[in-house]
Image (cartoon, grey):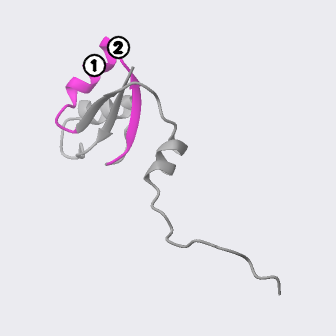
Amino acid sequence: MFYKVTQRKSAVGLPKVFSDTLTVLGLKKINRTRYVPVSQSSAGLIFKVKELVKVELVDSYKSPAQMKSENKSPSGIVIESKSSN
């Protein structure tokens, strides 16, 4: 089991402990997502920044390449056949 943690708000203007906690979780920019193993220590870190992140409980880890391919929109172009000129 993993926590899917997505940063939704910035830590600018907040005490340094909030930006440090986001860095430990692997979040550097808004809308970045990281998968964190379920444990007491990770739950404590997430609880510290609960106003800045969105958390979901998921069964499996997805690599950055898998997340990118899922979010990719279709190009809208389909090649039916190639001409042989």
* Position of residue 71 measured from the top left corner of the image (x, y, whole percent): 43, 52
Please indicate whether residue 10 sits to the left or right of residue 27 in the image. left
- Secondary structure beneath dot 1 equals helix
The residue type indicated by label 2 comes to Ser
Please indicate whether residue 37 sits to the left or right of residue 20 in the image. right
Q: Are marks 2 and 1 in contact (CB under 8 Å)?
A: yes
Magenta segment: does it hold 57?
Answer: no
Distance from the alpha carbon under mark 2 to that under mark 1: 6 Å
The residue type indicated by label 1 comes to Ala
The residues colored magenta run 31-52
Q: Examine the rendering and report whether any part of residue 8 can be seen.
A: yes
Q: Which quadrant would residue 2 be assigned to in this image?
A: top left
Residue at (24, 46) in percent of width and height: 10
User: Can you tell which mark lies on residue 39?
Assistant: 2
Compared to residue 13, the image places residue 40 above or below, namely above
Instruction: Check the image and name the residue furthest to the bottom.
Output: 85
Name the residue nearer the viewer: 15 or 53: 53
Residue at (58, 71) in percent of width and height: 78
